[in-house]
Amino acid sequence: MKAFIKILIVLLAVSVSVSAEAQVDTLKDLPLFKNAVSVGNSDGGNSDVSQNSAADTVSEKMQTLFELYSAGKYREALELSEELHEKHHLSKKENLYRIKYTLAAYKDLEYNRQADSFAKIYLQKDPFYTPKESDPVSFREVLSNYYTKPKFSVWIAVGSLSVEPVFDTVRSIVDPKNENPSYEISAVSAQIGFEFRPLKILSVSLSPTLSRYSIERTMERTEIATFRYYEKSAVIAFPLRIEAGWYFGREIFVPSIYAGAQVKYLLRSKFNAYTEARGNYTEIPDKKSDNDSKNRLNYSVLGGVRLNYNRRRITYFADIGVSYDLKPYNDPKKKYSNNELLYQNLYVPDMFKMIDMYYRFGIKVNLQYKTIAKYGYGY
């Protein structure tokens, strides 16, 4: 009996031991969940995940947009494009990518007007884009039907003027030689221009210009005496002109011609005058103001040529032109109004008009572009 009880106890112990070993083996290879995180740290300690999630979402959706279009699922691509436009803040590059495949999807669905609308938007945002072989064929086809032109531009220019007087009347009081006086007139100018281009080859511009003139008049009164007159003046002009350029493609060097008219207003004028005798000391007087004896308001016609070098939104140019005043520089109604010139220097101002020949160099910035269909329509 005792032997039987001992055997039973041994069997029970062995059974418990086997059961415990089996339980350990069952729990040994229990898999962990991949997304398990500790409590209180929902992003696993990686703060960059939350910051970059929006960018990752846009990037993924851009890839999905490409895949939907490539699979011929054009309507789904358009729906995704609309979602990207309405719910995400896209960079310029991302938005152009979205517009490209939106345009292509509309074209492949034969929604031609919508495709044309997106072509205009695309070129307004990137007016210098040249289609690539990797672009959708329908996108390249639609874009080839359009070209861009600058709509609004501004420029600055500086230059010099060489002036030739055209005489109406030369009055002599004590000039026995009865010869025409010798004039040397020059000027420097600065200009700012505002341009509107209604057509690709045609533009209209207004360009306020400030010029500073130097006038030197000399005349031999006797064999040893010379009368000298010096004047400095400042004139502001407002040229309005029409310009036609050889813009029939995306030319880099473009010549143009222009014509127009301008209003000129004399801001101020100062002079000094004296007679210089050879061998004698001559005291040169200070300059004095003489605004009232001039035609302060004058008018001119003008024309010229310009050579443009286009570099994307920037244009460098050289300008050669001529303008002709319609009224004399000095006012004939006030020829005797300057007592110092009349009584002390025995000089009555000459009546002459000015021909300005100017040379300018400048830089122009194209601010806004317009998209135009080559044949009046895009499809």
Image (cartoon, grey):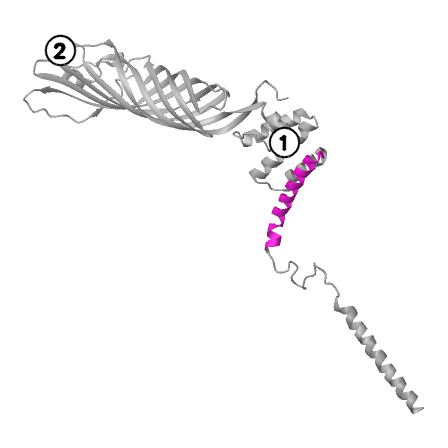
Q: Which residue is mark 2?
A: 175
Pinpoint residue 95: horizontal percent, then vertical percent: 59, 37
Q: Quadrant of residue 190?
A: top left
- Classify mark 1: helix, strand or loop: loop
Q: Work out which residue is located at the far right of the displayed protein and give it.
A: 1
Q: Decide: is 315 above or below 180.
A: below
Name the amino acid type tagged 2.
Asp
Specify the quadrant that holds the N terminus.
bottom right
Inter-mark Cα distance, 1 to 2? 84 Å
Give, as a single range, the part of the protein colored magenta.
48-73
Determine which of the numbered discs, if any, sits on residue 136 in the image.
1
Pinpoint residue 120: horizontal percent, then vertical percent: 59, 27
Q: Which badge, 1 or 2, is on the more N-terminal residue? A: 1
Q: Quadrant of residue 9?
A: bottom right
Q: Quadrant of residue 176?
A: top left
- Classify mark 2: helix, strand or loop: loop
In the picture, measured across the screen, residue 182 lies left or right of residue 103, that is left
Viewer-proximal residue, 8 or 234?
8
